[in-house]
Image: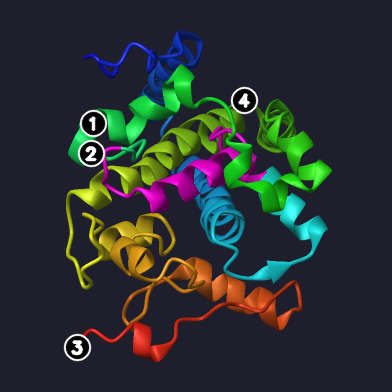
Amino acid sequence: MNITHPNTDERIIWQDTILFIVLHAVAIYTIGSQFEWRWVGLALASYYLRMFALSAGFHRYFSHRSYKTSRPFAFFLAFLGECSLQKGALWWASHHRHHHRFSDQPQDVHSPLHKGFLWSHMGWILCDKYKSTNQALIRDFWAYPELVWLNNNTWLPVSVYISVLSGLFGVEGVLWGFVVATVFLWHGVFSINSLMHVWGKQAYNTGDNSKNSFLAALVVMGDGWHNNHHHYPVSVRHGFEWWQIDPSYYLLCLLERLGIVWDLKRPVPARISFA
């Protein structure tokens, strides 16, 4: 299986790829040999805890500034999101902003339409060409030294997260709460770049292949309403209809009531009409 794109400047980083493969192998071994429901519960909790940081933090805050919050809470979201082994918050957001500029056009880094499903799903994130953060696309948050420092030291959140799991639950806690949960977290988030530009339904003509999926929305805490999001990227709410479940938005509403986040950019009715 070759996930290297034909362009010579898009070679795979083999150190990262080997780690990627090893963690998948360990996750499969863990599920097959040490299955207990209590560990499944821990994996689910670890999955959704960090998925919230990715969906509400990396995506809706750092990428789109869909609400406002304090610098300490922004740092917390970045720290927690970086526990998912998806590189730095500013790296993630800068690439996502690029994606919205060129969605499904030839310049799109991870379009399945132009570069194939496997490249879109995970090949590009293991590629040497895209390992750096594009500062020009993230100048607003690059002004915060604590976020830049964290973006350049992604080993720290992961190390702390593993240490906490080890201290609380032992080796099994690390295997299930980190390895298994992280592998599923990878593919949950990666599916938005790949699967949600191939499979699902379009409510809006957005000029790209973005799709909506109820099932994906459950897996990625509301980000599965991907066509809605491409229609109205700045909206903090991705599930426009009452039945379009959006857990990240519900939790942000709770945080709004607590005064932790504010100025949530909710959709304007005229922009979300399905008529």
Left-right relation of 49 to 153: left
Tell me, yes or no, whether the two marked residues, 1 and 2, touch with CB atoms within 8 Å: yes
Of pointers 3 and 2, the one earlier in the residue sequence: 2
The residue indicated by pointer 2 is 112
Kind of residue indicated by mark 4: Val
The residue indicated by pointer 4 is 171
- The residues bearing labels 1 and 2 have C-alpha atoms spaced at a distance of 5 Å
Kind of residue indicated by mark 1: Lys
The residue indicated by pointer 3 is 275
Q: Quadrant of residue 267?
A: bottom left
Q: Nearer the viewer, residue 5 or 186?
A: 5
Label 4 packing within 10 angstroms: few (<14), some (14-19), many (20+): few
- The residues bearing labels 4 and 3 have C-alpha atoms spaced at a distance of 54 Å
Q: Position of residue 76 (x, y in %)?
A: 74, 52
Circle nearer the viewer, 1 or 4: 1
Label at residue 115:
1
